[in-house]
Image (spheres, helix red, strand yellow):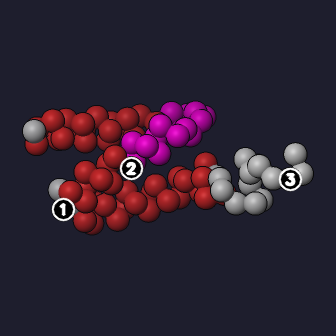
Amino acid sequence: MHHLLDLHYATARNYDEQCEREADEGGVANLNLFRALLFIIRFEITDRRLTRTWMTLDRAVRFSKLLGLHQTDSDTSEYSVGPDL
């Protein structure tokens, strides 16, 4: 079972690096990268890679702000549904 976790962790890390390279070349950040970062964080916490977890968590928080996820449920969000529709 642990070998499968390692395989998925490596796949998520490779996806993360590929998205980063594409972003450097003018690509667009996407929600799939954020999901991959969450998977990586979960694995690192479980595997007690705590220093690495903090670095990945910092990256995920910054990335979520870049995507505007912190405003999804707020009244000022472009996605909010209110009485002025």
Q: Residues within 10 Å of mark 3 (few under 14, many from 20)?
A: few
User: x%, y% of residue 39?
Assistant: 34, 46
Q: Amino acid at mark 3?
A: Pro
Residue in the picture at 44% in, 62% down: 58
Residue 27 in magenta stretch: yes
Labels 3, 1: front one: 3
Q: Secondary structure at mark 1?
A: loop
- The residue pinned by badge 2 equals 38
- Quadrant location of the N terminus? top left
Q: Decide if residue 22 is on the left or right side of residue 83.
A: left
Q: Residue furthest front?
A: 83
Magenta extent? 20-37
Q: CA distance from mark 3 to mark 1?
A: 47 Å
Residue in the picture at 77% in, 59% down: 76
Q: Residues within 10 Å of mark 1 (few under 14, many from 20)?
A: few
- The residue pinned by badge 1 equals 48
- Quadrant location of the C terminus? top right
